[in-house]
Image: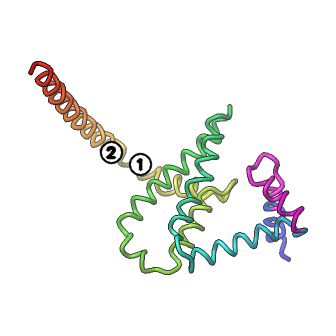
Amino acid sequence: MSAKLLEYREAIERQLRDKSKPWTTTFDKLESKTGVNRLYLFVGLVAFTGLYLVFGFGAELICNSIGFVYPAYMSMRALESPSKDDDTKWLTYWVVYACFSVVEYFSDFIVGWFPLYWLIKCIFIIWCYLPGELNGSLILYHRIIRPYYQKHHSQIDAAASAVAKAVNKNVDKAFAAITKKIDELHTD
């Protein structure tokens, strides 16, 4: 076994045994009931999920749950922690996820025909929230999204301000019309 592969294996085992993680108690129970090492249980779960994402029914729901549930939980934990670093990490994940979702929306009619799409998307999402240097959301944000934002933020801010003014104006008009109608009903 190569040194890098052994290093990854040890890192995964550390994560699976980390008492601060929500999955540790589940793996404790499974390992004690089956007698199978939690690493092998984890690999089996990953393999089953991968095959299901290719051949199973509801792959979109599973993939999107993987992209929402764990990141949402970790985001809430980050908000409740005193550290700002974890807030930044998860906020960056959600910015990248939102950008990906916009791009995905316009390519949906193409990706629907691609049989490995949900598996690849799931791998991409997990890469985006990996801990450490391999965190995809930090890589994509700093290499693609941030430079684009820095180049175009004044135009984006102007467009967002114009949209906000238009929305506020229309909400005010609608509220005034509703208030007028309610007043008319009360006077009749």
Q: Is residue 123 left or right of residue 186?
A: right
**Quick one: 174 or 154, which is closer to the camera?**
174
Q: In the rendered image, which residue does mark 2 sit on?
A: 156
Determine crowd level at label 1: few under 14, some 14-19, many 20+ residues with C-alpha closer than 10 A: few
Which label was assigned to residue 65? none
Q: Is residue 176 left or right of residue 65?
A: left
Label 1 amino acid?
Tyr
Secondary structure type for disc 2:
helix
In the picture, the quarter occupied by the N terminus is bottom right
Q: Quadrant of residue 31?
A: bottom right
By what rule are the colours in the image chosen? Answer: rainbow
Q: Magenta region: which residues? A: 13-34
In the picture, the quarter occupied by the C terminus is top left
Q: Tell me where residue 114 appears, x and y as whole percent.
A: 46, 80
> What residue appears at the point 58 percent right and 74 percent down from the top-left corner?
53
Label 2 amino acid?
Ile
From mark 2 to mark 1, how far is it between C-alphas?
8 Å
Secondary structure type for disc 1:
helix
Which label was assigned to residue 149? 1
Q: Are marks 2 and 1 in contact (CB under 8 Å)?
A: yes
Q: Tell me where residue 96 appears, x and y as whole percent.
A: 50, 54
